[in-house]
Image: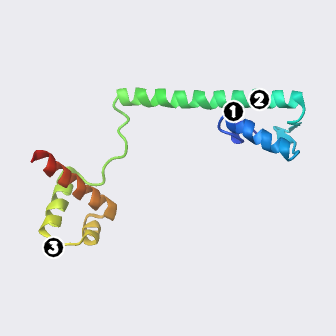
Amino acid sequence: MTKLDRLARSLRDAKDIVDELTRREVKLSIGGSVHDPTDPVGRLLFNVLAMVAEFEADLIRARTREGMAVAKAKGRLRGKQPKLSKKQETHLVSVHRAGTHTTVELAELFSVARSTVYRAIKRAIKRAGDTT
């Protein structure tokens, strides 16, 4: 194994893995050096490396959240854009209500997946229920 953070996502996972390796009497090779989990020094080193790996993962998550918050504040984080415009969605729902096309045909006509058609219809029903 090249890096310990590839072995486990948290210190608890790493400890469980080490306990399993110890039970099977397996030695662990990390970055070219062999560590014996039954040896006190090997166990200490493994725990320290596992803590550092978990710390690095936590830092990456924190930086990602911070970057997303900054992007959202600047208006750059908008998420996935809808396949249909409001006008297209309104037209799709009106054609569906007319009953002239099936859901599959509507999906083909508007070049979207059936799930998109179902969601558009569901949103229209919800909007109609909110105004009543």
Residue at x-position 19% and y-position 61% = 92
- As shown in the figure, which amino acid type bears the numbered disc 3? Thr
Tell me which corner region of the image, top left, top right, bottom left or bottom right, holds residue 43: top right
| Residue of label 1 | 11
Q: Which mark is residue 47?
A: 2
| Residue of label 3 | 100
Residue 1 in sight from this viewpoint = no
**Horizontal arrangement in the rendering, residue 26 relative to residue 13 (left or right):** right
Q: Give how far apart the Cα atoms at labels 1 and 2 are.
A: 8 Å
Q: Tell us which disc is closer to us: 2 or 3.
A: 2
- Answer yes or no: do the residues labelled 2 and 3 have beta carbons within 8 Å? no
- Answer yes or no: do the residues labelled 1 and 2 have beta carbons within 8 Å? yes
Dot 1: element:
helix
Q: What percent of the width, then of the height, locates residue 94?
A: 14, 62
Q: Relative to residue 110, is residue 2 depicted above or below?
A: above
Dot 2: element:
helix
N-term mark: 2 or 3: 2
Q: Relative to residue 123, is residue 62 depicted above or below?
A: above
Q: How is the image coloured?
A: rainbow
Q: Tell us which disc is closer to us: 3 or 1.
A: 1
Tell me which corner region of the image, top left, top right, bottom left or bottom right, holds residue 114: bottom left
Q: How many residues crowd mark 2 within 10 Å: few (<14), some (14–19), many (20+)?
A: some
Q: Give how far apart the Cα atoms at labels 2 and 3 are.
A: 66 Å
Tell me which corner region of the image, top left, top right, bottom left or bottom right, holds residue 36: top right
